[in-house]
Image (cartoon, coloured by chain):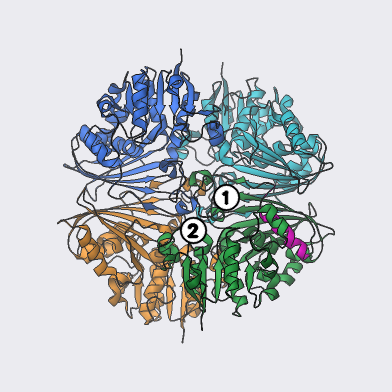
Chain colours: A green, B cyan, C orange, D blue
Amino acid sequence: MADSVLVAGASGYAGALAARLIDRHPHFELAAVTSRSDVGTRLDELYPHHRVSKVLEELDLDTHADVDAAIVAYPHGAAAPLVAALRERGVKVVDLSADFRLHDVATYEQWYVPHAHPELINTARYGLPELHRESLHGADLVAGPGCFPTAALLALAPLARAGVITDAVIDAKTGVSGAGRAATAKTHFVSVDENVAAYGVGHHRHMPEIDQELARLGAEITPVFTPHLLPLDQGELVSCYVTTDRAIDQDSLAELYADAYADEPFIELVDRPPGVRDVRETNLCRIQVHADERTGKAFVFAAIDNLWKGTASQAVQSLNLMVGRPEVEGVEP
Amino acid sequence: MADSVLVAGASGYAGALAARLIDRHPHFELAAVTSRSDVGTRLDELYPHHRVSKVLEELDLDTHADVDAAIVAYPHGAAAPLVAALRERGVKVVDLSADFRLHDVATYEQWYVPHAHPELINTARYGLPELHRESLHGADLVAGPGCFPTAALLALAPLARAGVITDAVIDAKTGVSGAGRAATAKTHFVSVDENVAAYGVGHHRHMPEIDQELARLGAEITPVFTPHLLPLDQGELVSCYVTTDRAIDQDSLAELYADAYADEPFIELVDRPPGVRDVRETNLCRIQVHADERTGKAFVFAAIDNLWKGTASQAVQSLNLMVGRPEVEGVEP
Amino acid sequence: MADSVLVAGASGYAGALAARLIDRHPHFELAAVTSRSDVGTRLDELYPHHRVSKVLEELDLDTHADVDAAIVAYPHGAAAPLVAALRERGVKVVDLSADFRLHDVATYEQWYVPHAHPELINTARYGLPELHRESLHGADLVAGPGCFPTAALLALAPLARAGVITDAVIDAKTGVSGAGRAATAKTHFVSVDENVAAYGVGHHRHMPEIDQELARLGAEITPVFTPHLLPLDQGELVSCYVTTDRAIDQDSLAELYADAYADEPFIELVDRPPGVRDVRETNLCRIQVHADERTGKAFVFAAIDNLWKGTASQAVQSLNLMVGRPEVEGVEP
Amino acid sequence: MADSVLVAGASGYAGALAARLIDRHPHFELAAVTSRSDVGTRLDELYPHHRVSKVLEELDLDTHADVDAAIVAYPHGAAAPLVAALRERGVKVVDLSADFRLHDVATYEQWYVPHAHPELINTARYGLPELHRESLHGADLVAGPGCFPTAALLALAPLARAGVITDAVIDAKTGVSGAGRAATAKTHFVSVDENVAAYGVGHHRHMPEIDQELARLGAEITPVFTPHLLPLDQGELVSCYVTTDRAIDQDSLAELYADAYADEPFIELVDRPPGVRDVRETNLCRIQVHADERTGKAFVFAAIDNLWKGTASQAVQSLNLMVGRPEVEGVEP
């Protein structure tokens, strides 16, 4: 029998896509979509291309919590109370916000806001199946990774686990959907068109998440991480330049990644630079490695769709594992 | 009296823009525009927005070399013989190709093709006025820098001259006009649109030029340099992550750049990330420096218009110096 | 048992997408993909996002014609001989070229080239299922409509069948993929970006096709038809301004279209202007009608994806009918 | 001696560009820039590429009205009171809003809002110099035309004056800057990118303006006018399909337009479809005429830059005439 799934915060880009993926999922049933801003609007009025005809409702835990699982697409800070309420009612949750990504409350509160439910942090699993699959089987609460950490960690994990990284520069490029649906000066077409610029220089909130997870994989480093905004809607590329404690030639590097990822259904190892177009609207991460003879560094390029693998489809991938379904169900490339 | 200027190779993006800038220049007179591919076509049929009505002619040195100066916009390899012929006739030349950028013939021939006129290499000055202004006064032959080296060297020069750089990563982003006017799979709209990918990974021809010039400025390093192609027409951003041999705080870093560039008419020092839109269709380079506390590195972001400061308007800036005109004449922001 | 399908000309945009749709179709089996230009290349090297790993082969009728059906994606003129050869061997064919769209040989030859197989013209059905469904059931040869005629005819058919049209202006806007994969000055990113212009003014090859089919539906008119090239990759919008022989109010107009299309699985009638983004990568046509009080005209706006409903997915829709499968199979929105 | 000019409402796209054009004008002096939303901000922080370093001030008529002229870039409704106050103080005004474009108060109030200063309407001249040059010489109050009317009227005027138009369809395409600087769902990058759709269908505010001015030129018609939003920042194309009361062949049509416009400094008559890129950042209008043999209609395509000729540079063109300067001064192509 189908598992029923609530998508809370379905009027934003990530929530709306999650609703679509659940709606078309062969096993899940989309129970309801809720919104804090567009109650009463049909979702397909806001997002015709998702073709989900459900009407956005105001959240009412008495009715909406009567589901098997929920995907919460609220901003950080606002997510934690809802996640706590859902967990209290026994609902499995994938939270797309940052609220349960960082293990250290102080670090969270330094980069974000005071945490309303620190007691739940340790119950959350980090929802990057390629790196932490076992911990997701049957999990009750999963923190969906940030889009940049998703790409950066998939790019660096094999080297991090090999224990060879001494330094890394992660230069990231993202499409505008990563900035969300809010209409701001930053997301105005005229600001973005024919433009490219860095942002969040030196203080982007995905930094502590990347640091934490790299350390967990074995790389106790503080990498450079700088995102850039590009004139495209969906897609994210991370260009990683890694200093290692020993020389690694192309064959060894390729082998390291093949060992790690050859059997992964959502990772494509390629021998030319991946473009974000190659993975658009998929749950794939496409990776090229290059042992650079000139500089002695290892280069890793990883492309994802920030809304899919970077957020919503990865949430479904995790949800599949949480409830015992095939990992690729409903998010096949 | 006006100096007459020939633009050879005016059917390409760089040559056409050079022709426009010369055509509107208060001092120079556009003597003729020549082309190897579009003889008989009015330049404003190919490039309406430049509004240069001259007809593209087949090059004839007997008539076309009767000028005071020339801007040569030929591909590498093809440029050297024409430059030699023009120099022989006493014509001052700015060459936009790579043929006279590299001082070492062997290095040139390793990255490009056999050099037809190695004897001229040492007579050429490197046309980056902000760094080598004195050598351009009255010069007869100037090699216009590559667009990426222009941005990268302006970004790194103050640190290089301070002798503090031990390592650097230069992640570059460029619009499609940098790939030239040739219609290829790479420049097809559908290939570029909604996409971003690295290219020339580990083997881009601007590498030896950057290496050579950084060394000349005092930084004997082999930096990472990786360009990426973006869905925009004009504009280039270099994001430089520099490892230094000592700690440099924000004030010192800002002061270093202010000392170097405060009086430069074409450099804008800003305290937020420069966008390529900010310098579109200008000879400006807009630079932000950031002393990164997390990583201890110095970040430098520099934005230019690859066709203007990266190529054609910088050529005019050099030409002004070569013939004793005010440096900013005809290329004021 | 699966029907095997050959896609000939699979290295172009339309053929490659057809190959993908067949490859993922629950009933069809992709027998082979052939190409005249990229033999030996894996299709997913050219089109990673289609994820079809088959290698492009040189066409060999002895082996490749041993299929149940074929989709031919050759240029006009080149298609007819291949279609004839396949038909001779009993293969059902959907031809994506113009070779079998026009019923009158003289008209075809006036707009295109001499026709190699005029004897087959009358055996071909026009593959616009919403308008000619019955004739496609079990058909052996189907001419896939042009992308503009697809949108224009779906937009105008209800009014044409009502016999009320006296004049019409069809102003069309299309993305660059409609111009095909060939790299030309017209498809160069720098030509298209930040631009819009009409093309084919007064002499576009889709004109006689639109005229013929409108007449067949009951409107013996010569409409204005002017396409414009836009800076986007996929998507096509036709804006139709129709003069009618009687006044039609909004309710009547909406009812006319609801009667015609309410049950159509691939037509969405909407009450606000359709955007091409709404139908991207679908077989849908999204239509708004507006009875204009100021001018007394009927406006119809119709949006499709030129590569999908305008070409490849519509071909699969037709193929489903030709072999007795459910019409929506494999091309569900 | 220089005429001093105030730009009120300089934080919007049109006002900011007007400020730049005045700032660089050889005769005018930019006295002050005012804003209702960004007081205290330097204009070059909002618009680096305009390079106007003046700080936006709160409007204070006591000081700011002490100028020779003003360009008012306020929204409709808000403009009229300021225009009245400035006129009362003897300041010549170009108003970029709709407040003084429509001669009939009732029509204005039907399409816009109650008019605060109807007594001034008849003192305003319509600022389209190519059509009404004489009336602008020495004028005190000029209403800058809407961007769509500018392009549509330049496109249709020769035919209108010839008295031959019986019907017309004007299908317009515009970049996003036409929607202004306000960040809305409509101007969000993700809404516009890869999209095109009509808007204002049947009720766009430029309709009564086009009707009024066409009538004034001799065409008492109600044309279709439908704008479409395109993924580009600046640029506007109108495609006009004109029904005439007599047959007009290509030569006659071309001659009609040459007679009207051959000496106009800002009109380019061309024989292929004009693209908006051809006129980007200029005060030019580029026009092609096509006598269509198939349909008997006259087609006219006209491209402008909506912010330049469509708004700000045309205002400067008018201002030149108002104060007796050469018409092209400061806005030469």
Q: Residues within 10 Å of mark 1 (few under 14, many from 20)?
A: many
Horizontal side, residue B275 vs residue D135: left or right: right
Is residue B170 shown in magenta? no
Pointer 2 indicates a residue of which chain?
Answer: C
Visible residue check, residue B82: yes
Compared to residue C183, the image places residue B39 above or below, namely above
Q: Dividing the picture into quarters, in which one does residue B45 lie?
A: top left
- Chain letter for the residue marked with disc 1 in the picture: A
Residue C29: x and y in percent read 49, 80
Q: Residue C181 shows which numbered tag?
A: 2
Q: Which residues are magenta?
A: A201-217
Q: Nearer the viewer, residue C310 or C64?
A: C310
Say left or right for D7 vs C269: right
Q: Residue at x 39, y 21 (%)?
A: D320
Which residue is nearer to you in this view: B246 or D36? D36
Residue sitting at the far left: C246
Residue type for callout 2: Arg
Quadrant of the rendered image containing residue B314: top right
Identify which residue is drawn at 49% across, 47% down: A189
**Majority secondary structure of magenta residues:** helix
User: Disc number at residue A230?
Assistant: 1
Quadrant housing the C terminus of chain C: bottom left
Q: Is residue D188 above or below residue A282?
A: above
Tell me whether marks 1 and 2 sit on the same chain. Answer: no
Name of the residue lying farthest toward the top: D1
- Residue D72 image position (x, y, % from top left): 40, 29
Mark 2: few, some, or many residues within 10 Å (few <14, many ≥20)? some
The location of residue A118, given as percent across then percent down, is 68, 63
Residue C224: % across, % down: 27, 52
- Name which quarter of the figure residue A271 lies in: bottom right
Q: Secondary structure at mark 2?
A: loop
Q: Amino acid at mark 1?
A: Leu
